[in-house]
Amino acid sequence: MSTPEEKIEAERERQYEVRRQERIAANSKPRSWAGFVLIMMVLCLCFGVLLAAFVVRRANTNSIFGTISTALLGDRTDTVSAPVVVSQIQRLNRLETVQYNVDTVVEGHRTSALNALPDLLVGDRLLLVVHGQVIAGVDLSQLKPESVRINGKAIQVDLPPSIIFSSRIDEAKTRVFARSTGLLVPVDPNLETDTRRSAETQVQDAATKDGILDTARNNARSSVESLLRGFGFQQVTVR
């Protein structure tokens, strides 16, 4: 007959053997790959979405990203109509493309009713050193629908004429260089004011002669061309 100590020891050995057999049985079971495959599919899907977003963000017609984007999403220009292009260009409104600074000398002159007498006696003359600023560009709000023509991936746009938006005299940098008043007449207090007023027109004329309108148009063309290429057009003509 077994003693209580022997029974306890026998029970311990039996439980140990049961746990060992359970571990052996668990290790011998074939592994399931279903969970692993599912995780990999989710990761690949997330990577694909991120890659597509990156390609679309960087896409243009002159880059490898543009080629990939076209292959994935099709030709983007198919959805861009002439009214849409006109609306987007018109949003640029008064496109200021050039600022022209002018330094020039403007003459102001007053003569007396006694024209027979020389200026030394009855004239009033001053020379004004003028610093002016002229801003020019294109008013794209005036763009007409018939000025935009689309043919597949090609587009042609005829811009409105370039114009001068504003011209002003910098009063702080404008000064009287010389003045001479006749011996027989008083100093005209309005001569300098009137000369400054007429100087604005002369500054604008000087900027026009230097080609400010041509520069403004060329700069506007470059800006509009960049906008149109962003729509996906490959052949862009802006006139």
Image: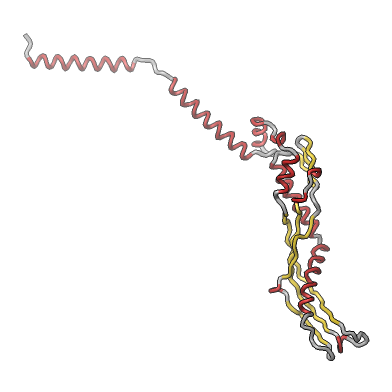
**Front-most of residues 87 and 38:** 87
**Front-most of residues 66 and 113:** 113
Residue occupying the far bottom of the picture = 184
Residue 35 sits above or below residue 3 on the image: below
Residue 67 sits above or below residue 165 on the image: above
Query: Which residue does the image show at 31% across and 14% down from the upper left?
Result: 25
Q: Position of residue 138 (x, y in %)?
A: 76, 54
Q: Where is residue 105 in the image (x, y as percent from the top left)?
A: 79, 74
Q: Looking at the rendering, in which quadrant would you find the N terminus?
A: top left
Query: Which residue does the image show at 74% across and 41% down from the upper left?
Result: 83
Q: Quadrant of residue 58?
A: top right
Q: Position of residue 154 (x, y in %)?
A: 77, 38
Residue occupying the far right of the picture = 116
Q: Quadrant of residue 178?
A: bottom right
Give the image's coloring scheme.
secondary structure
Q: Is residue 217 left or right of residue 113?
A: left
Query: Which residue does the image show at 55% across and 35% down from the upper left?
Result: 50
Count of marks placed on residues: 0
Q: Where is residue 10 in the image (x, y as percent from the top left)?
A: 14, 14
**Front-most of residues 69 and 110:** 110
